[in-house]
Amino acid sequence: MSRTLYDLIGLAAGVAFILALKGLSHPKTARRGNLIGAFGATLATLVVFFYAIPDSSLPLNNLGWILGAIAVGLAVGVPAARKVEMTQMPQLVALFNGVGGGAAALVAIVEYLHLGSQATKAEVIFTVFTVIVGCVSFSGSIITFMKLQELMTTRPVIFPAGRFIIAATLVSVIGVGGWVVAALGTTPLLVLAVLSLLFGVLFVLPVGGADVPIVISLLNAFTGLTVAASGYVLDSVLLIIAGTLVGASGTILTRLMAEAMGRSLFGTLFGAFTAKPQAASDSLEERPVRSGSPDDVAILLNYARRVVIVPGFGLAVAQAQHTVRELADLMISKGIDVAYGIHPVAGRMPGHMNVLLAEANVPYDQLEEMDEINPTFSQTDVAIVIGANDVVNPAAENTPGCPIYGMPILKVSNAANVIFLKRSMRPGFAGIENELLYDPKTMLLFGDAKASLTKVVSALKAL
């Protein structure tokens, strides 16, 4: 295959990636966009096997290893994608993203060793960049995976002089990167990789609670940048296109999510070092709350004119999205105006609730973003909060120093009645008490969300 034909096929794959990204921008076209992206990735992979480097008589080397690696990837990736539960999707995204960054770093190291003294300064600089950002993305993504999987504490991990240690590690990474560019050699490159892995861990440890999704998005952007840089090292236009798309979209998403949290990106990443310690409070179990039964909730809903459903991570845990859809359809049949209030960072990843509700075929026009839904809560008779806590917590507005202070929230407290579906009185992912639980107009319905909603549906049908 000629280089011209190879580049044209690579350009077609790049166009497929662009069309895929466009398709993923709307739920109605997301499935088609995903298929287009998969086609582009398959095309980009297959064309390599038919391309011979110009002016080279060498055959495709290590074919057995390549096919073996593809087989292992399929054996791991396909079952993981098919069997993973919606509650574990953020962890899977974080893990796959980290693997992508690590792979780009390894490819850059191997290509650097292959080029040796023939490498140009530009190639060395891009190799250094790929190794640094790829290793940071890999180790940082592993830490976010462990936090989301609760293999370690979800709270920010801070330590004495933490800011100075992180800064010193970053300076060391930059210094060793300069050493690689100036002196070349395998040893400084391996030292650079180790320091970058360490920095990735230190970079993510201070982040906790509701800020983790933002870091996932940021690390995703990092992985895109490493792919683009490795594309320059490998002289691959396709990798440059794909990496730039991922890096740009990840950067934009990170910025939007940081704005949705009401703080700067720097504050999101390192705010734990300057946060004021929270005063100890009485145990939630010792404070009185108003609990109700499914019959009580059904009666309240039956006489409502407008109901807003606020989904959260608990909805995903209970896999109650289909039951929520059934309840919403039943209320609509009774003439009740129903909407879903979607917070930008609800759940554990960007768009988590949108994907969850789309799985139950919830009409997209019933989903309303935070800025659209907030002005309507004062005209809402009942707000049903299902497994959400931090995104409706008034502490974000009235408790300076708390981890979520300054984050815009869904103002469910303005509704005439609030119903919380919770398993227990445990706080949300950010570990903060929610005073709204003790408001006289709030009713708590304890238990598994799916089982509770099923009982509510049965009771509402009987009225």
Image (cartoon, rainbow, N blue to C red):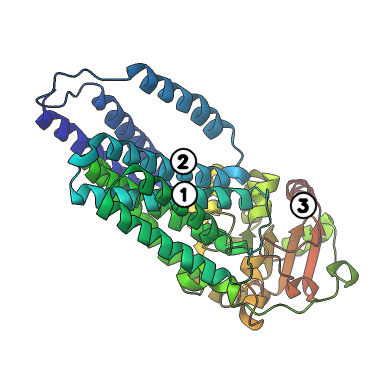
What residue lies at 38% left-to-right and 43% top-to-bottom? Answer: 105
Q: Mark 1 or mark 2, which is nearer the start of the sequence?
A: 2
In contact (CB < 8 Å): disc 2 and disc 1: no
Query: Looking at the image, which residue is at 19% across and 38% down?
Result: 11
Query: Which residue lies under the disc numbered 1?
Result: 194
Compared across the picture, whether 65 is left or right of 56 comes to: right
- Secondary structure under the numbered disc 1 in the rendered image: helix
* Closest to the observer, 276 or 335: 276
Residue 124 screen position, x and y as percent? 25, 48
Q: Quadrant of residue 33?
A: top left
Q: Is residue 32 left or right of residue 200?
A: left
- The residue lying toward the viewer, choosing from 429 and 410, is 429
The type of residue carrying mark 1 is Val
Q: Are marks 3 and 2 in contact (CB under 8 Å)?
A: no
User: Which image quarter is the N terminus in?
Assistant: top left
Where disc 3 sits, the SS reads helix
Determine which of the numbered discs, if any, sits on residue 452 in the image.
none
Q: Position of residue 277 (x, y in %)?
A: 70, 78
Q: Position of residue 96 (x, y in %)?
A: 48, 41
Q: Earlier in the sequence, mark 3 or mark 2?
A: 2
Amino acid type at circle 3 is Val
Residue denoted by label 2: 99
Label 2 amino acid? Answer: Val
- Tag on residue 456? 3
